[in-house]
């Protein structure tokens, strides 16, 4: 998967910027809103084929470049979601272990036995 620059622009946004468009100017040229284009660029919704067909000449790229950019964004989004799921699982396991330890200590306090 391609690495993204430090500015965190998605590959599709990088193509747009390289072509000299702001999100607003590109959206107008594509006949959509800037919000919709932002959703496409962030892989929050699929890009319709009609819009893809408009992006290719507008951004002066070939179909493969656009599709690769979109695919890279979806792959990164899926990897981030998987990482968050793994982090949440580890957190749940740690909390469960901590709760079990506290329950065990409540039943068997350390140093709390009888004194002879």
Image (spheres, helix red, strand yellow):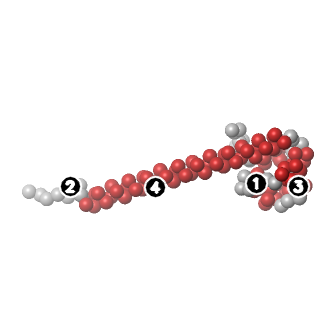
Residue at image coords 47%, 53%? 91
Helix, strand or loop at label 4? It is helix
Instruction: Indicate the secondary structure of the residue bearing disc 3.
Output: helix
How far across and how far down the image is residue 27, in percent?
86, 56
Tell me if 6 is positioned left or right of 23 in this view: left
Q: Which residue is mark 2?
A: 111
In the visual, does 96 lie left or right of 49? left
**Residue 90, percent from left and from top:** 47, 50
Q: Position of residue 86 (x, y in %)?
A: 53, 49
Q: Secondary structure at mark 1?
A: loop
Mark 2 to mark 3: distance in Å?
A: 73 Å
Check if mark 1's residue and mark 2's residue have beta carbons within 8 Å.
no
Which label is found at residue 92? 4
Mark 3 and mark 4: span between their CA atoms?
A: 45 Å
Disc on the earlier residue, 2 or 4:
4
Which residue has dot 3 on it? 30
Residue 114 or 32: which is nearer the viewer? Answer: 32
Considering the image in quadrants, where does the N terminus appear?
Answer: top right
> Which quarter of the picture shows residue 60?
top right
Mark in the foreground, 4 or 1: 1
Quadrant assignment for the C terminus: bottom left
Looking at the picture, how far across and down is residue 82, in whole percent? 58, 49
Packing grade of label 2 (10 A; few <14, some 14-19, many >=20) is few
Q: Secondary structure at mark 2?
A: loop
Task: State the mark number for residue 97.
Answer: none
CA gap between label 2 and label 4 equals 29 Å
């Amino acid at each position: 998967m391609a690495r993204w620059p430090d500015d965190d622009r998605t590959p599709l946004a990088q193509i747009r910027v390289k072509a000299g468009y702001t999100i607003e100017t590109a959206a107008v040229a594509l006949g959509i809103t800037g919000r919709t284009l932002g959703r496409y660029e962030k892989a929050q919704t699929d890009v319709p084929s009609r819009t893809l067909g408009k992006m290719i000449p507008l951004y002066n790229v070939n179909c493969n470049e656009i599709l690769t950019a979109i695919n890279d964004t979806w792959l990164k989004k899926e990897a981030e979601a998987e990482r968050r799921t793994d982090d949440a699982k580890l957190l749940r396991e740690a909390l469960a272990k901590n709760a079990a330890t506290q329950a065990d200590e409540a039943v068997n306090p350390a140093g709390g036995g009888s004194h002879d």
